[in-house]
Amino acid sequence: VSTRRAIPDGDNDETISRQLASSLFTPTEVDLFMFCASTWNTHRIHYDRDYARSEGHQDLVVPGPLQAARLAQLLSEYAQAKGGRLHRMSVRHQLTVYCNEPLELRAVLSGSEQRHSCTAIEVLVFVLDATGREATTGNATILFEGAGLNPPVTLSGGAE
Amino acid sequence: MNLSIQAVVGRFERSVTAGIRYGRREMDDPAKDNVTEASAHSWRFGGDDDLTFIVSRADIRRYALSVGAAAGIHHDVAAARQAGYRDIVGPAYFFQTIGTSLGRLVPAAALRPDGLIGEDDSEDRVVAGGSEVTLGAPICAGDEVQVTVSEDPPEIKQGSRARLTIRTMHRTYSVAGVVAAQEVYVRIGHG
């Protein structure tokens, strides 16, 4: 299990310029209920605290797919606001995250390339727990369609 | 698709019977380890209709609320149409509401004590491992989503504290033949 932080600390100017989007999210019992209900997730570790503890968890488990969905939403809203769209995302859940634990979601620019008729920007994504450990990590691609379109971010210039 | 009450009841009864049978029979037969979810679901639920999902506005609104997607295009028909969509549109990962429910539409009595379905009998603790998703066309209310599913043979590894069973599922969601999302989902069982 990785507990190191792969992204530099926030006092690094370059990191600040490369951070595309972030949000704070503290999943409550209601959040877990709503997500499990809408996806018909019947796994008891997400809604039965006693059962979750009987499996060795310290509290209700925040579903990995909920973390992925929140990251996708963060990226999707960023992309749409800039005239692009989320194309792909890959995530790996590194740590179990528990109900009522404050989480920070981050998207950090890692590269960009010109493709045939669009510009692709590569993004690293993270869900950090309250102590700054990486609970979920991954990467994603956002596409900006149209030949000759200048993407709203560059590696040298950072996010607009 | 119009179904009579008798047809619906008959389908439900078949799913109950087959769903309860499925867990033991499949798990006891190693040759079935790489059975695809598609064939498993057809067998359990009695028809290909189970891999078709007709999206309602309520489905989209519920999912949108559950992931904090507050934009009007997910909730308000007029706003969605003004933005160029045929109806309200699902958030990026809306396909989850289809994929996660596959195989879980069974009575509570057919679930294991941990709430999972019988096919997970060999695993004591199950958690999500990760996912890889490529997005295509948007999914809107009124769409008929076709799902194709398959599962790799389980991968067994020895973890530091327990044996790990890694299951990798592949799902493709299409609307009118156009791919809306391709998903690889990894689930890890301990024990």
Image (cartoon, rainbow, N blue to C red):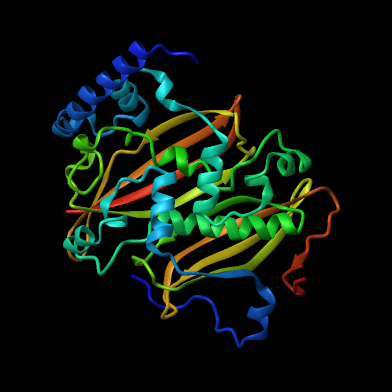
The answer to whether A22 is drawn above or below residue B148 in the figure is below
| Residue B19 falls left or right of residue A16 | left
In this view, the residue in front, B96 or A87, is B96
Residue B46 visible in image: no
Give me the residue at 77% from left, 49% from top: A118
Relative to B114, is A110 on the left or the right? right
Determine the residue positioned at 16% across, 54% down: B191
Which residue is drawn at the image coordinates 66% and 65% (left, top)? A111
Q: Is B128 located above or below residue B39 in the figure?
A: below
Whether B159 is drawn above or below B118: the answer is below
Residue at image position (75%, 66%) is A153
Image quadrant in which the C terminus of chain A is located: bottom right
Q: Residue most toward the right?
A: A148
Q: Which sits in the foreground, A118 or A67?
A: A67
Q: Position of residue A80 (x, y in %)?
A: 71, 54
Q: How many marks?
A: 0
Image quadrant containing the N terminus of chain A: bottom left
Residue B151 lies, in percent from the top left, at 35, 36
In-image side of A99 versus A128 (left or right): left
Query: How far from the left and from the top, in percent, is residue A76?
Result: 63, 55
The quarter of the picture where residue B25 lies is top left
